Amino acid sequence: EVQLVESGGGLVQPGGSLRLSCAASGFPFSSYWMHWVRQTPGKGLVWVSRINTDGSGTSYADSVKGRFTISRDNAKNTLYLQMKGLRGEDTAVYYCARDKGYGDYPDYWGQGTLVTVSS
Amino acid sequence: QSALTQPRSVSGSPGQSVTISCTGTNSDVGGYNSVTWYQQHPGKAPKLMIHDVSERPSGVPDRFSGSKSGNTASLTISGLQAEDEADYYCCSFAGSYTWVFGGGTELTVL
């Protein structure tokens, strides 16, 4: 069974940093691209970032480019999202999601971790 | 990277059919046959319902179907059931390995 468990969310001040983690199990993690998607409380889903199997290829939404960095540790079956220069509009539930193949679409999703940016 | 346009809400009675539209541009919906639909119940993670415009993953009832014409994709749910009440989101590949979601549609089963 595919399982994705996010952690690392919490309250952070504007301008601060936070690193999210996503522990994967139930599938060969190193063979799949991965995504981060966020959801503002009470609002819609927004794609944030994706990474290929070995971490050599990444892409970002314009709203986070230059502030967020996606990475992965295939030995630990873990996906990361390093967030810097956080703003109020970054407040959201952050989901990690597995890609169906190689840049196809997110298929399995975790339960999410809440990031709140506030002073 | 503008969000795809979905109606904020739709509704239907049990047994009826509803269609949710998802309008984008030539750079996303119209440019690729890579539209997906997700169902999200309150407090839950999104669940994949349709991929590649009209393909259903195993386990998804055949009451759910997808289509696309030009820059607009559609999700049709026939034979509405109470458990279909949820939020539905479309998503499209948007080139350069980026993706864009719709704003979501709240489905109410009357």
Image: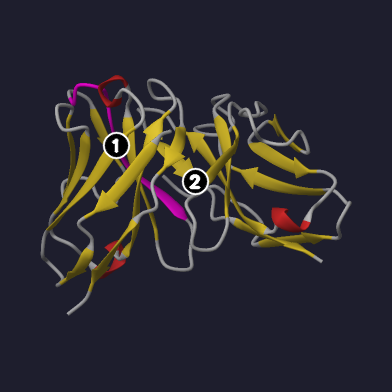
Label for residue A24?
A: 1
Q: Which mark is residue B101?
A: 2
Residue sitting nearer the eye, B36 or A31: A31
- Asked if the residue under mark 2 is in contact with the one under mark 1, i.e. CB atoms within 8 Å, the reply is no
What residue appears at the point 19 percent right and 42 percent down from the top-left corner?
A80
The residue range painted magenta reads A45-55
Which of the colour schemes (rainbow, by chain, secondary structure, one colour) is used?
secondary structure
**Is residue A52 covered in magenta?**
yes
Name the kind of residue labelled 1 in the image: Ala
**Are discs 1 and 2 both within one chain?**
no
Identify the element where label 1 is drawn: strand
Residue at x 63%, y 45% (from the top left corner) = B22
Answer above or below: position of A87 versus B54.
below
* Vertical relation: A69 (above or below) B97: below
Q: Nearer the viewer, mark 1 or mark 2?
A: 1
Question: In this image, B96 relative to A104: left or right?
Answer: left
Q: Position of residue A58 (x, y in %)?
A: 23, 31
Q: Is residue A48 left or right of residue B90?
A: left
Residue A92 in the image: state x and y as whole percent: 34, 62
Rounded to the nearest angstrom, the CA distance separating label 1 from label 2 is: 24 Å
Which amino acid type is marked by label 2? Phe
Q: Is residue A18 left or right of residue B8?
A: left
Neighbours of disc 2 within 10 Å: few (<14), some (14-19), many (20+): many
Q: Is residue A50 covered in magenta?
A: yes
Who's the residue at 54% across and 25% down the image? B32
Secondary structure under tag 2 reads strand
Q: Is residue A83 above or below residue B66?
A: below
Question: In x, y percent, where is residue A27?
Answer: 35, 26
Decide: is B85 above or below B36.
below
Instruction: State whether the magenta stretch is mostly helix, strand or loop.
Output: strand
Tell which subunit mark 2 falls on.
B
Report x, y in % for residue B81: 79, 53
